[in-house]
């Protein structure tokens, strides 16, 4: 998702972007993906070849967090894991310039908890993009307990410049999008687990019966079953409500390495 955010920032907002990943190979792979997106947009006459060249020139890369020391606005898009995110934000706090805003693309974790790892909690904010970022129009903006109003407004302006519609949401587990979406997906997995219907019939029911663009199990595979599990665990652990208990089958799929489309196998097979 980080690549999608970077692409929209450079292409739509026309701001310089520094891509950071500790794995240089991943960074190079990411740039190749961006080249494909730009070429596709040129082919579809969405942008000119000159615009594509200018967009590509806005990217630079680094494999060190210290390479982000001069950025004005940072958007973290690491794995949905509190320990990983707090470690990153702790380091960024000491490396980035004092006025820099630190945003997280977390889809469920408390912004206040992440901000507490820094000495600039007032400049930490949630910026939850939807996947795929170039296509989906929404960004949830989530202030933490200490986030300044000016930071909320700056974040809203940036997202708007990206062509996104913004909603501002309280710092609650799952925010709004995943507080509604993930229990829906989890319930579909529970139906599959109990063998009340096949995966195909569950998806067809929701597509043709409620006009959903795709069924919940197909959607889960596209999101990533590991991500779905991580979000359900956040909801369950932070609310204490049993209605958010992750489906046993969801845990089994993740334990087996069946993460969804990205791994070639999830509820459905993609190989």
Image (cartoon, rainbow, N blue to C red):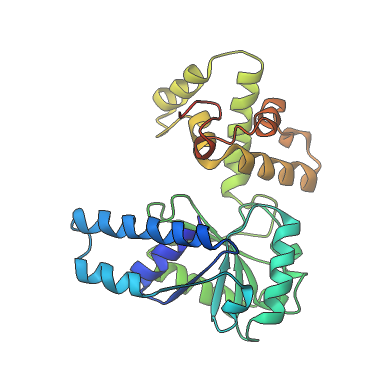
Q: Residue at x 58, y 80 (%)?
A: 150
Tell which residue pokes out farthest to the right in this image.
240
Whether residue 120 appears in this view of the structure is yes
Instruction: Work out whether 104 lies above or below 155.
Output: above
Against 256, residue 76 (above or below) is below
Q: Position of residue 29 (x, y in %)?
A: 45, 56
Q: x and y percent of residue 95 in the render? A: 67, 81
- Answer yes or no: is residue 146 visible: no
Q: Which quadrant is home to the C terminus?
A: top left
Residue at 62% across, 44% down: 227
Q: Quadrant of residue 118?
A: bottom right
Taking depth in this image into account, of 158 and 35 the one nearest to the observer is 35
In the rendered view, would you say 199 is above or below 113? Answer: above
Asked if 46 appears above or below 144 in the picture, the reply is above
Left or right: where 243 falls relative to 74? right
Q: Position of residue 5 (x, y in %)?
A: 46, 62
Q: Is residue 234 left or right of residue 78?
A: right
In this rendering, the count of numbered labels is 0
**Residue at the (46%, 21%) spot, across then down:** 205
Residue lying at the far front in this picture: please name it: 25
Q: Position of residue 2 (x, y in %)?
A: 51, 59
Q: Is residue 142 left or right of residue 218?
A: right
Q: Residue furthest bottom?
A: 98
Between 24 and 263, the one lying in front of the other is: 24
Specify the quadrant of the image occupied by residue 236: top right
């Amino acid at each position: 998702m980080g690549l999608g955010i970077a692409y929209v920032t450079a292409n739509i907002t026309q701001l310089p972007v520094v891509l950071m990943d500790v794995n240089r190979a991943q960074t190079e792979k990411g740039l190749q993906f961006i080249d494909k997106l730009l070429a596709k947009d040129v082919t579809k006459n969405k942008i000119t070849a000159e615009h594509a060249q200018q967009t590509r020139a806005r990217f630079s890369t680094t494999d060190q967090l210290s390479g982000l020391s001069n950025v004005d606005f940072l958007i973290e898009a690491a794995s949905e894991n509190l320990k990983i995110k707090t470690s990153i934000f702790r380091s960024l706090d000491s490396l980035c310039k004092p006025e820099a805003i630190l945003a997280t693309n977390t889809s469920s974790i408390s912004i206040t908890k992440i901000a507490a790892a820094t000495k600039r909690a007032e400049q930490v904010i949630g910026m939850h993009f939807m996947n795929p970022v170039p296509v989906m129009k929404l960004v949830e903006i989530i202030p933490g307990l200490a986030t300044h109003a000016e930071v909320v407004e700056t974040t809203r302006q940036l997202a708007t410049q990206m062509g996104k519609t913004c909603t501002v949401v309280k710092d609650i587990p799952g925010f709004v999008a995943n507080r509604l979406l993930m229990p829906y997906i989890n319930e579909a997995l529970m139906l599959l687990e109990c063998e009340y219907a096949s995966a195909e019939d569950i998806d067809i029911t929701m597509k043709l019966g409620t006009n959903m663009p795709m069924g919940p199990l197909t959607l889960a595979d596209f999101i990533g079953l590991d991500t779905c599990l991580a979000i359900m665990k956040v909801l369950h652990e932070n609310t204490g409500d049993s209605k958010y208990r992750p489906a046993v089958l969801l845990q089994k799929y993740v334990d087996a390495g069946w993460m969804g489309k990205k791994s070639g196998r999830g509820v459905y097979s993609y190989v």
